[in-house]
Amino acid sequence: MSTLLELHNVTKRFGPVEVLKGVSFSLEAGEILGLLGDNGAGKSTLMKIITGIYSLEGGEIIFSGKPIPYPQHNPREARALGIEMIYQDLALAKQQDVAANIFLGQEPTYRFLGFWPMIDKAKMETAAQAAIARLGARIPSVKYPVGQLSGGQQQSVAIARALTFNPKLVIMDEPTAALAVREVEHVLDLARELKRQGISVILISHRLPDVFAVSDRIIVLRQGTVVADEHTAQTSMNNVVAHIVGAH
Amino acid sequence: MQTPLTSRVFSGLNVRLESVLVLLGLALAMAIFAPDFLSLSNFLNILLATAVIGVLAIAATFVLCAAGLDLSLGSVLAVAGVVSGVLCVNLGLPWFLGLLGGLLAGGLLGAVNGLLIARAGIPAFIVTLGMLSVARGLALIISDGKPVYGLPPVITFLGQGRFLGVPMPVWIFLALVVVFHLILSRTRFGRYTLVIGDNEMAARVTGIDVPAHKIRLYVLSGTLAGLAGLLFAARVNAADPTAGVSYELSAITAAVIGGTNLFGGRGTVIGTLIGALIMGILQNGLNLMAVPSFYQQVAIGTILVLAVWLDRVRDRRRV
Ligand SMILES: Nc1ncnc2c1ncn2[C@@H]1O[C@H](COP(=O)(O)OP(=O)(O)O)[C@@H](O)[C@H]1O
Ligand SMILES: [Mg+2]
């Protein structure tokens, strides 16, 4: 296995609040990493630094052997590198249809009248349909506004968007929080499938059994620092919970 | 869950069925009750009277779709008019420099709006309210408070000339409607405009440069206001620094009646055309029936509120 992602001493503050106080860890290609921690531990912030929503203050992040250039790094660059994230609030445009959301920022185009690039709706809808079908999700039509779909269906749209352009790393921030049991199983199966394809996954979840079921390794973040970095097979839920609440 | 009737019937154009019905109903009522309403020349009159506000309404549609606001449209219109008037008449420059100068002035003021909103983070309401006043002042300063008369013939042709019997402003307005309808509904630029208004975070995380896009939108808005200013000056053969007062409100009204979501994420230019025509037909028909203009204002305000109320009812039903 080769190392895909390395974080060295990453720090970040929002005004006076030091949210990340020197975070270091690494992630292998095809590895599923469970990222755990209490609310406000800094998990989402750390992931948003990787995807270029925020810059970092100190430290370094290396992806595929190359340092990510902060502060120029941005979501477009992250996607070009093969980093995709399913955001905690899904970050979907609710009045736009399913196809539009899946291809957001990467719409296929054709040249209208030979010179004017226009969105190729037919191609986009076919591909969106296929992407949804691959996930085994059921959505009445890719022409539906996303806001009219159920929580689970919206989740599928967010996942489909993350998988459409062959990512190397997929970050899932609380992907199962709003889902029914059957849908949770789907997401976990998906994480395993990505691993099988050699894609790395960072899974953030409050549901410990889910994380234990799929992850190779577990990292616990507490008040902006890594307090545990253990192989899933060599730790226990009790141990992890103790780290999360700071009982160690 | 069922597809709303509107999107089944007009999915190709994305136009609200209600707007079309109101437009047709209104036209029918006027045809019955207003003498001389039903004639080609009156129809062209309506389009001519709608053209200037209509161009502004296209600008308003784009900005509103992105959850923005441009209150400076009417004032920027005046600046563009007097800039081209001063360039052509007072400085004696050729007509094309006058046109270019007017458009550039509009685009420049739009750029100032955009930079203050997207880079400095000042709310669009405040920035463009400020610009409403600043641009009006600039128009008065540039023209020394007086209208500039005697525009070059090429420019007045754009306002008063006809091609195939149809007034030039109508050609220009309808061409802009087609082009900008396609831009908003079929291009990435239009898609990103809607997404920014729908959920700015969704735009950001998918790599859309949101501040740059907003700046482009306000430049577009200012440039269209500039074009409207040129058309207006050309039509009345005078660049008047007091032209276009409160036109931005009519433009926003047309866009909202046409189905643009005031809070962003939804809207079409064809819808806005229908909204502008509803207002134009109402005014024209009531004029023909010799109803005083006070009543027209009551009618337009009522339709605006009804349009938004209809939207609310439908959105609630959907969920
Ligand atoms: N944009 C922001 N501005 C200011 N503070 C923020 C911002 N985002 C997150 N925070 C703060 O950073 C801390 C970590 O938040 P977050 O990364 O969302 O934690 P987690 O995802 O682990 O629950 C919290 O105290 C939160 O209030
Ligand atoms: Mg979080």
Image: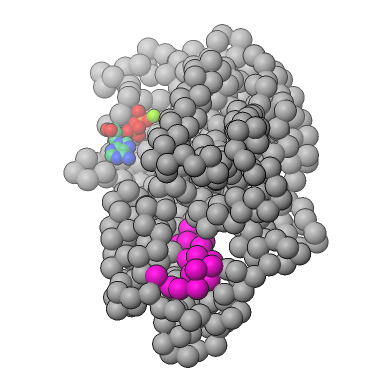
Q: Position of residue B286 (x, y in %)?
A: 51, 40
Residue segment shown in magenta: B220-240
Q: How many marks?
A: 0
Tell which of B88 and A62 is nearer to you. B88
Point 59% across, 56% down: residue: B48
- Tell me: residue B90, above or below residue B79: below
Scheme of image coloration: one colour
Q: Which quarter of the rendered image does ligand 1 occupy?
A: top left
Q: Can residue B266 be seen? A: no
- For image coordinates 68% across by 53% down, the residue present is B41
List x then y, in percent, for residue B230. Answer: 51, 69
User: Which percent across, then down, holds residue B287?
Assistant: 51, 44
Query: In the picture shown, does residue A244 fall above or below A52?
Result: above
Quadrant assignment for the N terminus of chain B:
top right
- x and y percent of residue B12 in the render? 73, 37
Which residue corresponds to the image point at 50% horizontal and 65% vertical from the top-left? B232
**Type of secondary structure dominating the magenta stretch:** helix
From the viewer's side, name the closer residue of A52 and B260: B260
Q: Quadrant of residue B300?
A: top left
